Amino acid sequence: MKKLEAECCDVTCVHYDAVEKAKVHMPAENLLKDLAEFYKVFADTTRVRILYVLLESEMCVCDLAVTLGMTQSAISHQLRVLKQMKLVTNRREGKTVFYSLADDHIQTIISQGMEHIME
């Protein structure tokens, strides 16, 4: 991948109207921190793979482990993180726990991300 460098202005000229507009619309620092934490979850390939599988169907840990060629322990660990961030939800059916995406927002985030990288 070619290394791109950011270009800088040749002169210092602050556009105060743009600065003020950005400041007015800037969310609180704690919300930005939460948003950054949310996106960090997507920085792990295993978690993205789990979410991608759950786009198609709800699955139990056993199903996910076989589908992704991983141990149940590794899958459980990642599901815990996904559940803490409210990206997946689960339901119990007897002795089996099935996982699914928490809501349609997750599908949208994954789909739009995939569209973006394939451009």
Image: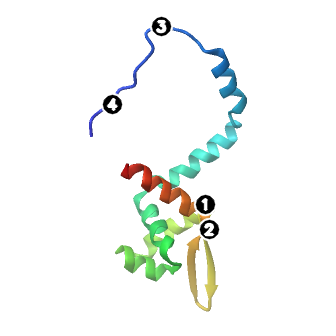
Q: CA distance from mark 3 to mark 4?
A: 21 Å
Q: Which residue is mark 3?
A: 11
SS at mark 3 in the image:
loop
Any part of residue 70 in sight: no
* Quadrant of the image occupied by residue 23: top right
Q: Which residue is mark 1?
A: 105
Any part of residue 65 in sight: yes
Residue at coordinates 57% horizontally, 45% vertically from top-left? 36
Residue 30's place in the image compared with 116, above or below, is above
Mark 1 / mark 3, whichever is N-terminal: 3
- For this orientation, the residue located farthest to the front is 119
Say which amino acid is labelled 3: Val
Residue 86 image offset from top left, x and y in percent: 63, 62
Residue 60's place in the image compared with 35, above or below, is below
SS at mark 2 in the image:
loop
Mark 4 / mark 2, whichever is N-terminal: 4
Mark 1 / mark 4, whichever is N-terminal: 4
SS at mark 4 in the image:
loop
Q: Which residue is mark 2?
A: 102
Q: Which residue is mark 4?
A: 4
Label 4 crowd bin: few (<14), some (14–19), many (20+), radius 10 Å: few
Q: CA distance from mark 4 to mark 2?
A: 37 Å
Say which amino acid is labelled 4: Leu
Residue 35 image offset from top left, x and y in percent: 61, 46
